[in-house]
Image (cartoon, rainbow, N blue to C red):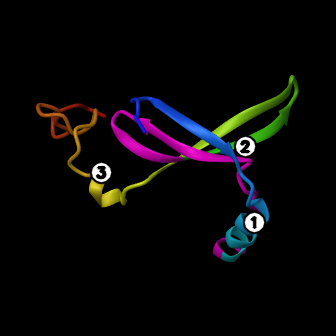
């Protein structure tokens, strides 16, 4: 499958009950809701898991999204991101 940068794909979550049980085990003190849709996205060359939730608002139904990196956090250190590009330093004399 060809992956295009800054794009993703979602599929209806057919395992919501199993996901709910897993979430309750992992986060027993939280009110958890399994995703209505699950998929993948590529953003700025990095791959993410993508969850979609159908919600109700004042103006009707809408969809919200959550992204989680596929690679461990340590792997993203040193990648060319806006904060790690050469010439970008946070050791300057900025007063804030």
The structure residue drawn at horizontal position 76% and vertical position 57%, both measured from the top left corner, is 33
User: Which element carries disc 3, helix, strand or loop?
Assistant: helix
Tell which of 58 and 64 is nearer to you: 64
Residue plotted at (79% across, 65% down): 17
Is residue 38 a member of the stretch shown in magenta? Answer: yes
- In the drawing, what numbered circle is on residue 69? none
Residue situated in front as seen by the camera: 94 or 44 = 44
Residues at marks 2 and 3, CA–CA distance in whole angstroms? 26 Å
Counting residues from the N terminus, which is met first, the one under dot 1 or under dot 2?
Answer: 1
Cα–Cα span, label 1 and label 2: 14 Å
* Label whose residue precedes the other's in the sequence (2 or 3): 2
Task: Give coordinates of residue 32: x percent, y percent.
Answer: 74, 61
Q: Which residue is mark 3?
A: 76
Task: Report the magenta residues as a range.
Answer: 26-49
* Disc assigned to residue 53: 2
Residue 95 % position (x, y): 26, 32
In this view, the mark in front (3 or 1): 1
Where residue 59 appears, as percent x and y from the top left, is: 86, 22
């Amino acid at each position: 499958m060809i992956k295009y940068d800054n794009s993703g794909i979602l599929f209806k979550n057919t395992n919501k009950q199993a996901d709910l049980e897993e979430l309750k085990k992992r986060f027993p003190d939280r009110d958890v809701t399994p995703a209505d849709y699950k998929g993948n996205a590529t953003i700025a060359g990095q791959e993410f898991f993508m969850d979609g939730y159908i919600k109700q608002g004042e103006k009707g139904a809408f969809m919200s999204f959550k992204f989680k990196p596929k690679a461990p956090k340590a792997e993203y250190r040193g990648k060319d991101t806006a904060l790690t590009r050469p010439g970008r330093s946070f050791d300057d004399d900025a007063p804030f």
